[in-house]
Image (tube, rainbow, N blue to C red):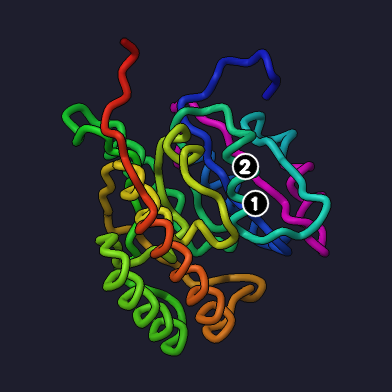
Amino acid sequence: MTDDSPKPDVSVVVPVFDEEDNVADLVDEIAAAFAGRSFEMVFVDDASRDKTRDVLKQLKTRHPQLRVLAHRRNSGQSRAVRSGILGARGDLIVTLDGDGQNDPADAPSLVDKLAREGAPKNLALVGGRRAKRQDNAWKRFGSRFGNGVRKWLLKDRADDTGCGLKAFRRDAFVALPYFDHMHRFLPALMLREGFEIEFEDVNHRPRMHGSSKYSNIGRLLASFSDLMGVMWLNRRARRPGDVEEV
């Protein structure tokens, strides 16, 4: 895809780090899910140590909709997502994780729900909700505990912010304050800016290759400080309502 090619309606943004065994299948599945639609795929390699970047570059010959952005230094999932969105050309963004556990076949349904006729005014995000988690019991417990505490404190109505599969409007995302790990707080941040949000059940699959980059303890420690920060942001929010030129 070149700079002078038609602007796509949807940009599918996928952050990846050391996922050389997963990206080929994932690219194929995304292409199949959005076949017949106006879309691009933006994979962001977060300075992988394996051959993820090389595999992605080879896949571009088979998938002209594929673009590959690369970080020079490893900067984490939120920064990779943000790099992809800032580089995206579509007005509607879909994000999903690079480990293959999110099912790309669910993505068009989220886009359709977001862009449907008669949607609530200011609807900016439709988040996936993993109906049947395919992780181990310890990881599921950590996720339920973290989601419960966050939902209680932030009142963001989100049962599963850890689901990487989301559809949202690009202009809404760029209006949000950026910080590391912000991808787990998108519903709360969208509500803070006065946007509407909705959720939909999606499929979840076991990881076929590689290993998780997160642990319950590491996620809990990071989430606690982030949660305090988002609570502070919410307390400091002041919305003017509609802005009019007079």
Q: Secondary structure at mark 2?
A: helix
CA distance separating discs 2 and 1: 6 Å
Q: Quadrant of residue 230?
A: bottom left
For disc 1, the marked residue is 80
Residue located at (45% from left, 79% from top): 135
Horizontal side of 130 relative to 71 (left or right) equals left
How many marks do you count on the picture?
2
Q: Quadrant of the C terminus?
A: top left
Q: Is residue 11 magenta?
A: no
- When the figure is inspected, residue 56 is found, relative to residue 153, above or below; the finding is above
Can residue 100 be seen by looking at this rendering? yes
Left/right of residue 195 with respect to residue 105 in the rendered view: left
Q: Is residue 36 magenta?
A: yes
Residue 120 picture location, percent across and down: 19, 36
| Vertical comparison of 22 with 61: above or below | below
Residue at the disc numbered 2: 84
Q: Quadrant of the N terminus?
A: top right
Q: Choose between 39 and 119: the one closer to the eye.
A: 119
Residue 168 % position (x, y): 40, 41
**Residue sitting at x 62%, y 42%:** 84
Question: Dot 1: within a 10 Å radius of its alpha carbon, few (fewer than 14), some, or many (20 or more) residues?
Answer: many
Identified at 42% across, 54% down, the residue is 186
How far across and how far down the image is residue 85, in percent? 57, 39
Q: Are marks 2 and 1 in contact (CB under 8 Å)?
A: yes
Q: Provide the residue span drawn in magenta.
A: 33-59
